[in-house]
Image (cartoon, coloured by chain):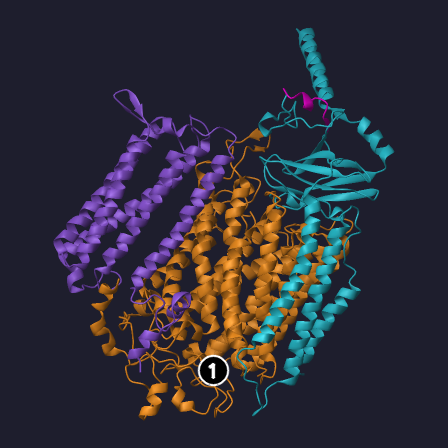
Chain colours: A cyan, B purple, C orange
Amino acid sequence: MHPGIIFLGVIVGSVLFHIFTPWWWTDIASNWGAMDDTINLTFWIGGGVFILVCLFMVYCIFMFSYKEGRIVEYKPEDHKLEKILTIATTVGVIALLAPGLIVYNNYINTPKNALQVEVNAWQWGWQYRLPGEDGILGTAQVTEISDDNPFGINLDDPNGKDDILIEDDVLHLKTDRPVKILLRSLDVLHNYYVPQFRAKMDAIPGIITYYWFEPNKIGEYEVLCAEYCGIGHYAMRAKVIVESEGNYENWIKEQETFSDLIAKQEKNKLKKNLMAKNNN
Amino acid sequence: MSNNSLNNLPEGFKGMSHDMGSDQTAFKGVQWGKVMMWIFLLSDTFIFSCFLISYMKGRTSTVVDWPNTSEVFSLHVGGVPVPLLLIAIMTFVLITSSGTMALAVKYGYEKNRKMCGWLILATAIGGLTFVGMQIFEWSKLIHEGVRPWENPFGAKQFGSFFFMITGFHGTHVSIGVIFLFIYARKVFRGDFDNGKRGFFTTMKSDYVAIEILGLYWHFVDLVWVFIFAFFYLW
Amino acid sequence: MSDEYNQKNTPLEAKSSETMSGTSGTSSKDIDYVRPAELPEQDLYHGHSFITKWIFCQDAKIIGIQYFLTAVFTGIVGLVLSWLMRLQLGYPDLVPFITPEHYYQFVTMHGMIMVVYFLTALFLGGFGNYLIPLMVGARDMVFPYVNMLSFWMFFIAVCVLMASFFVPGGPTGAGWTLYPPQAILPGTPGSNMGIILMLASLSLFVIGFTMGGLNYIITILQARTRGMTLMRMPLTIWGIFTATALAMLAFPALLVSCIMMTLDKMLETSFFMPAILQAGEVLDYGGGSPVLFQHLFWFFGHPEVYIVALPAFGIVSDLISVHARKNIFGYRMMVWAIVGIGGLSFFVWAHHMYVSGMNPWFGFFFATTTLIIAVPTALKVYNWIITLFRANIRMNTVMLFCLGFIVTFVNGGITGIFLGNVAVDIPLSDTYFVIAHFHMVMGIAPLMVIMGAVYHWFPLVTGRMLSEKLGKWHFWITFLGAYSIYFPMHYLGFIGVPRRYYEMYDSPYVASATGMNEFITVAALIVGFAQLIFIYNIVSSLSIGKPAGKNPWKANSLEWLTPEVPPAHGNWGEKLPVIYRWPYDFNVPGAKEDYITQTTPPSEVINAEVQKT
């Protein structure tokens, strides 16, 4: 069999695989449809180039396989052709790059009305902190973390008192409201990634990173850690529940604030002291 | 046909690329060993650049304040702290040794064996003095409690970067000093005059070797100037 | 500068060939003129005992073979590790001893071995040592002794790396990128001796490579034979030269990051370590920057990609030209593309860090530079396929591997455009799309070139041909198998499956991929076992292969024109060759044969209408 047939088969097979594949994007659940569009654009331009280049190669090996005495073209250079190819490629690359940069510009500029959510990552789990009534998160530090203060919120910071603490890996979000995810890590690198939202960013100990998206589809989504973080990396999952505004408000009312937590601990301490006294 | 063609060579940038791309050698008349040293130094430049850029990044991103360098590095002379005194002497010694090295290369090419040998020895002693003073400074800092992992004066990265970078540079100087002594011996023995073959490589010795060693030594001095600027003056 | 040189002028011309070879009559003397020798004859150390001839050998050809065999050995270790990983991914409970801990150790060692100890060492140490002196017409590398040290340093580095399999805690499982803080903290397997040995081994590798790299660069720049201008060098040499230059400038960043991480581990400095809370305790670290490590690592890591790719580009250009019996199209553009890609590769490193938390504004700059680099790369692809157009293509194993390279490289190159473009990269980064991309473009594609190159140069090294029949079986299984491993894998990335997952199938939307993972595992096992054909072919051909004779492929370049085949120590016998043309004069109109070797003087092919010399 002529090798060209097999190479042709590889190309046709790739195209068929793409057409009939059961594996494709998860249904998008955020505003980042533009990312899918740029991917599709790259896919069609890139895929077209791949097919053209390979078909040309197959054509050549069909037409010009070895024959004694075949007349071979001798043309070391062809400046005109080289120039055309350079310009065409450059134009193609610009066509791919420009939309990408526009989308990226949106990605790094968070809208003003975005809801802030702080994600705390550690080996190997997640917890969340939402700003309270004042809409501002209190400052926090790894070194402040203790059993009484699981997020390491600075006790002198008044903004931190009304912060809502969620010591659980299920996060609720309301639909159609932009969310700014602020990422903090207590130990190593992590990455808060929901495939359906498309967006992701590493959490780095020592600094706060961010990204934003606008969930627009009610449902439950799995969170995956997308930056290798040690043995438990693959098991570091969590859940995001996107729900209507009403349900969200109900959920948030049930959550504890930092001052609630302090009060509760104080009460416990008091109780303990009392018990100790009684025992005496 | 070749003799007159020298007059109509291309000029300017075109001429340079023409020469570089011509047959046999890209750098005409330059010894293999010398090109090797230049390229090695280029690579070494990248090592020191990475160190110094890391240092700049580390210094600007620490959470604790950087110590006041003019206090940390000052010497007490008669009870009065004099900032930069020791460093000034160290820098002066090292730069002077660069001068003696340059003279050694000159006398080497003039085949003045004695002068060449003594000047190499002088360079080596300059290098030794530098290393000695560096050891003094290290022990002073260690005595005051500065360690790679901690620093009583402020950010702990100060100790880590200081010991790592000056240590790496000091290693360079020490290796240079060892080679200077070896070469001094070779010069006095006359190896470079009679083209004696080297111990390991069985290559013939030549006075170019002194220039190559000189290149290394000047490089080490130049790096010190940058370290000096970044650690002591910033 | 000229003083030192003039003194040496007298003895140097005495031995090298002053007379024009094969010329007669005064008229041809003018067109055959080549400048006299500038360089003295190189002193070579000829080994006499077994040890100096074969072990501590100073002949670049033997050193090349030593590099080749050592690299292939580590490569086989890497291959076996990849099997174990694939077994876990395809059939999770089949092999009981693959715990998460072991899985991550396999991932890490597989990555590091393949990128650094296999591909880099094989292309530069193996092919570089063997081919550079032969192709530029030198007797040996310029510093044979340093060259020998380079190999033994590499050998020690490999030993240290392999030793880490046997220390308590095992080898490091930090991922080949070794990102701190995780790499040196207890949550990662092998975070004690494993990571220390890895860092030590890398440092030794860098030191050893620097010694070799100086040799390659200076041999190419300063030790070419008469008539060998830079623009007459085979593209193989251009590729290896540029890759070595990149390595000399990129490895320092790796060395520095290794030193700093070793100190972080052993002395508890805090270069890369911020304040960390682990297992409820605040560690003694504080104030360092983990992102700094990533910058240093990728400042090495991205040029590293081209350190592997550029020699492959160069070699494949030569193979295509020889076996298509046609000059490589656009030679000068090919050279500038190699150099341009090499230069640009220092300005694109942060495209590995789009989601790393670095300053987001860097994204614009690095996306732009990354896509600029696509232009010269695309031009190279065009030139390869235009070379095939109106050629006379021998459909032998070597050519098949070249065609396989083109398909896989174009595929992987185009997925590279996805990942270089920052907005497209965000959903795809850290998924299987990345794995598929880089295995296609810097795993399979360079491997195709390596295998093609082995089929091509085996007759030169051993004097015998490899079996074509076995070669074709080897090619088709490897190519089709590897393609069916990595092509579908892109779609796992589209689904959103993250990389470096020990197990993933309880996610509802990922469960659909189980079948594909099983298929990929089976394909990986088949491709791996197919390499036994290759090994059998090599071993059996050593004794029963058809004798090759001189220049069996009718190639033009110098390595085939040595007086003895295989070439002896010193390569050229009495006289160094003299070069009159570039190595791609195939099927020149007017010439009697379909090739004109580089040493053929113009007066011998007076009727040939040569356009480029």
Picture residue at 41% right of the left edge, 49% below the top: B47
Across and down, in percent, residue C88 comes to: 65, 55
**Farthest residue toward the right?**
A246
Across and down, in percent, residue A162 comes to: 73, 23
Q: Secondary structure at mark 1?
A: loop
Query: How many tags in the picture?
Result: 1
- On the question of residue B144 being in view, the answer is yes
Q: In the rendered view, would you say C587 is above or below C452? A: below
Across and down, in percent, residue C462 comes to: 43, 78
Image quarter (top left, top right, bottom left or bottom right) of the C terminus of chain C: bottom left
Q: In the rendered view, would you say B66 is above or below C550? A: above
- Disc 1 marks a residue whose amino acid type is Ala
Q: Is residue C261 magenta?
A: no
- On the question of residue C69 being in view, the answer is no
Left or right: residue C193 versus residue A136 is left
Q: Is residue A159 magenta?
A: yes
Of residue B140 and residue C343, the one placed in the foreground of this image is C343
Residue at image mark 1: C555
Q: Which residues are magenta?
A: A156-165
Residue B143, quarter of picture = top left
Mark 1 closeness class: few <14, some 14–19, many ≥20 residues within 10 Å: many
Residue A125, quarter of picture = top right
Across and down, in percent, residue C433 comes to: 67, 57
Picture residue at 43% right of the left edge, 55% below the top: C205
Picture residue at 46% right of the left edge, 50% below the top: C253
Of residue C411 and residue C97, the one placed in the foreground of this image is C411
Of residue C481 and residue C241, the one placed in the foreground of this image is C241
Task: Specify the subunit that label 1 lies on.
Answer: C
Image quarter (top left, top right, bottom left or bottom right) of the N terminus of chain C: bottom left
